[in-house]
Amino acid sequence: MTYSTKPAHIRALLFTATALTAFASPAHAEDAAATEAEDSSTIIVTAVDSLRLNQKTEGASRLGITALQTPASVETLDGDAIRLRGDLTIQDAAARATGIVNASGVFGFSLAARGFVGQNSVMQLYDGMRMYNNTLTFPADPWMAERVEILRGPASVLYGEGAIGGAVNVVRKQPGDTLEASGRAIVGSFESYNIAAGAGGPINDMIGFRIDGAYRESDGWMKRGNSSATSLSGAIKLKPAEDLSITLSHDFSRQLPRTWFGVPLVGGKLDKSLRKNNYNVTDARLRFRDNWSQGKIEWSPSDSFSIRSTFYHLWANKYWHNSENETYVAATATAPAKIRQSSFLELYHVQRQTGNRTTANVSGTILGLENHMVVGFDVNRITYKNISNSGNNATRLVDLFATDTGLFIDQTGAAATKPRYKNTIHQYSVFAEDRLVLSDQVSFVGGLRYDRPRIRKNDYVNAANNFTATPDAVTWRLGGVYNPIPTLSIYAQYATAADPVGALVSTSLAQSAFDLSTGRQWEAGVKHVFWGGRGEWTFAAYDIVKRRLLTSDPLIPTIQVQVGQQSSKGLEASLFLKPVDRIGITLNGSVLKARYDDFSESVGGVRFQRAGNRPSNIAAKTANAFLSWEFADGWVADGGFSYVGKRFQDAANTLVIPSYTLTDFGVRWQFTEKASAGLRVRNIFDETYVRATYGASQWVLGDPRAVEASINVAF
């Protein structure tokens, strides 16, 4: 971004904010009120949302049952509450849920849950569909989300291999039954701003629509930390008959993430004087473009039978041009301290994914007992083409406080940028779920799935690396729910999982030789809605074991090392209270014990046993709290608190990542029925904290204190 363009952007933002506010003026609000006294688009005045235990959740089951009826840990985050809390990304929003830690690095999606971390362990879905992407960057903005559903524990029986820690399902905004529109404008620290708007509703009795757009930009808090993201989403819903609906949708995002790969450690510790430096090359680039098209057909000829079929196509083009590794070189008698640049990576990532999921829901009786069943299949085809400069071994020393860190170093010959390989995956799956109701108080829920991916690699450089592999897997789960009263559930469940040894779309010849990792989980818990819905609480205990596990090598993030066995056991609890209409409180926390049960690694050619150590980047304790208080008519104050316990960067547990506590505060003024203005401060105490690690020598820090002002309207 150049300085000359910034005033135009700011003027555009202010113009948009003014226009949105004008639209929501009392005159317009009065017109809207004449149509409907309680318009569904009225801005929610509290960012505290209930646990939604009585709400149906698609992310945890396709049976159409509520969280109370599901024998698993399920949490739903409302999209409006996410936006009012000021969460900038889906990862930020998910990290407010019980036991979830945002471990995302420079870009992409990485969460930790129940002792496991990364996209292969905590899966992200969009509208219930899995994106097999080893650098997941979609969706780019929480403005598009109607809600975020979180399932903790194994999800393989629902979505295929992986996800032993859990799954996060982002449900996009859908065409609604009433016409509504909303908008938002934000300006903040580090020359940041965000503009978003959306509208939806019926066009006539047969056609509905939804359209949303968002743009954000920032100069960042570190040198050369500028970034931007554009997101667009649209849907048309056709209802040619009472029992038939067809929804066509398309989502687009274009991201230019900041090209900063963290702070190099000095003697294994953080030197705060270096935290704002950017040691990447001055011509660094990151560009991500994603498109996601879907067609959904839903046919419900009767109350006891329905069919849903979803066709989809994803195309993702991504580009890297960076020096990603930065290592501190200590001063000597003849030379000052330096930073060594390495891993000069240029990569074109070209991915296409086409597929279909079809399910049939059948309700009836078995031996006089109420029964609900879902059967279905998943098929998809993925192609991933890698064009890169693999083998570039260039290095360069730069000064600690250099303003010019040099240009990208290209190499010729074998290390030149060229097509390297193409992976093609054909995925075939069949699955079933069933809920058998024995009485008003007792029910059983089970599931079974068979996956058979066929992976074929075509290596353009060395044909000896070509292979074909078919790592099939069977996973299942079975649980029971006891309801002594309708608003109280006591449940237990056993579930299994299976993981590939790495990212499916970029599986290598070496990885194809490994067996699938397998896992199992025992879980038991309680869920309760009380005080007439003003209170909800949950408690869960679990024990997970994963065998033949591969985890990221702390020295080289793209390489996997195999361990014999890893386990995790823990407790989770959450509470929602609304003691009076003007006050809302949410609390949650988790404690766990994660360990390597059987793992040894080679360091300098010497074998070291790591059994009993905690896996890297796993926090043993987490906690979140959020309070919202309408202290006067139209005035709301809210505050959030998040705690993440200490983690370890290495399997030896010698490199400690300190614990951190983040606090944020906001105040909003609802100056008309349809418009509000807000002021928010994130990380009030300006804590320096580590969000993720990159390699053995870099820490990716979270954002420092930031202030933002916002205008929100609905009409």
Image: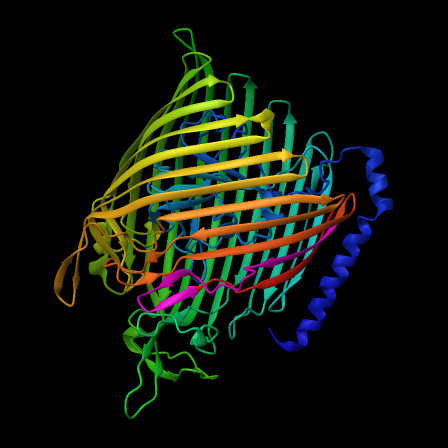
- Give the main secondary structure, helix, strand or loop, of the magenta stretch: strand
The residue furthest left is: 606
Task: Answer with left or right where residue 136 lies relative to residue 533.
Answer: left
Task: Answer with left or right where residue 398 lies relative to residue 598.
Answer: right
Task: Answer with left or right where residue 111 lies relative to residue 521.
Answer: right
Residue 529 at what x, y percent from top left? 53, 27
The reply to whether the magenta stretch includes residue 681 is yes
Q: Which residue is at the front of the view, 575 or 140?
A: 575
**Where's the N terminus, which quadrant?**
bottom right
Residue at figure coordinates x 79%, y 56% from the top left:
19
Q: Which portion, as a residue range, is magenta?
A: 676-700
Instruction: Answer above or below: position of 98 versus 3.
Output: above
Residue at figure coordinates x 23%, y 63% from the top left:
462
Q: Which residue is at the front of the view, 409 or 367?
A: 367
The answer to whether residue 1 is seen in the rendering is yes
Instruction: Answer above or below: position of 445 versus 350.
Output: above
The reply to whether the magenta stretch includes residue 57 is no
Residue 158 at what x, y percent from top left? 39, 34
Instruction: Answer above or below: position of 559 versus 209.
Output: below
**Where's the C terminus, which quadrant?**
top right
Say how many tags the image has. 0
- Color encoding of the figure: rainbow
The residue furthest right is: 27
